[in-house]
Amino acid sequence: MLLQTQSLTLHFLPPLIPFKPIAKPQFIPCKQIPFRKLALKCSVSTVSCPTTHVGISNDKPFPAEASRTIMELSSIGTLSMLTSEGCPLGVGVRFAVDDEGSPVLCVSDSCKELSVDKKSSLHVQLDQCGSRTPQCTIQGVLDKPKDRMISKRLHSMWKMRFGEDVNEELIYVVAVERVLQMEDFAEVLEAKMIWVDRLGFDVRISCPQKGLFDVRIPFPTEVTDEKGAKSSFNCMSQQAWEVEKNYQSPNFKKVKHLKQIPYRGL
């Protein structure tokens, strides 16, 4: 919606009959009374809902979509395999994600020989500047691409992602069988925005008496880009301000009568 402003300038002719200026009354300010300094307080109210009803919320992405976001934003993880001695072995690896969402790794032959079979897991943790650390674990089969063309395409994708040329024989793909998602909640002393996606955002609130609370705030409509997210934030901030100030927009009367002014020329 575009708001247009129009300035109206009134032009008056000089008076024909001179008149005496009217003396302006003197304004004597009253004695100023200092205001008391009050500390601003913020309160959070929650609505308790019955816990017996279990349903799927439409204002938050599914865990699979959140895990896909974690994988696309990260590039470092821990690859775990089972050795011949029966002990789990975890090594730090870099990875990329193909179009299907499968992790693509560059694993050396010495590391691959330690594994008993092709079963493996890849644990990924998204480090952020805030307090939330989303994590997910990918379980599946670690194997080389069977198609030569696919192997070349993954090799080119790796070179584009990390800017280095590696041996094509060291490229492996994890065929995903299971995805485990978990969240790490750390202690904070203030309210912070900890996650933003296309359907809304999460805010963590620290209450000294009651502890920590996570609040899911959905967007009015689904956003598809950064510009849409900023527009939703501005709209929601305006609505929150109106609710806080108990603001109600006045009802303006529509103009029904127009007075025509004859044109007399200059």
Image (cartoon, rainbow, N blue to C red):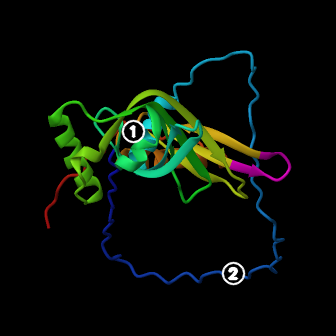
Query: Crowdedness of circle 1 by 10 Å Cα count: few (<14), some, many (20+)?
Result: some
What is the quadrant of residue 264 in the picture? Answer: bottom left
Taking depth in this image into account, of 70 and 241 the one nearest to the observer is 70
Taking depth in this image into account, of 212 and 47 the one nearest to the observer is 212
Q: Which residue is mark 1?
A: 223
Query: Which circle marks residue 1 in the picture?
Result: none
Taking depth in this image into account, of 33 and 27 the one nearest to the observer is 33
Q: Quadrant of the C terminus?
A: bottom left
Apparent side of residue 182 relative to residue 260 in the rendered image (left or right): right
Apparent side of residue 39 relative to residue 118 in the rendered image (left or right): right
Indicate whether 148 appears above or below 171: above
Q: Amino acid at mark 1?
A: Val
Indicate whether 244 appears above or below 263: above
Q: Is residue 207 magenta?
A: yes
| Region of the chain picked out in magenta, as a range | 205-211
Q: Residue furthest front?
A: 85
Q: Amino acid at mark 2?
A: Phe
Query: Whole-Å distance between the Cαs marked 1 and 2?
Result: 56 Å
Q: Is residue 220 visible?
A: no
Q: Quadrant of the N terminus?
A: top left
Name which residue lies at 17% across and 42% down.
152
Indicate whether 193 appears above or below 257: below
Q: Which residue is mark 2?
A: 27
Q: Of the two numbered discs 1 and 2 on the same chain, state the one appearing first in sequence.
A: 2
Name which residue lies at 58% across and 43% down.
202
Q: Position of residue 10 (x, y in %)?
A: 33, 65
Q: Position of residue 172 (x, y in %)?
A: 32, 40
Q: Is residue 259 magenta?
A: no
Apparent side of residue 31 relative to residue 176 in the rendered image (left or right): right
Name which residue lies at 47% across and 30% down.
64
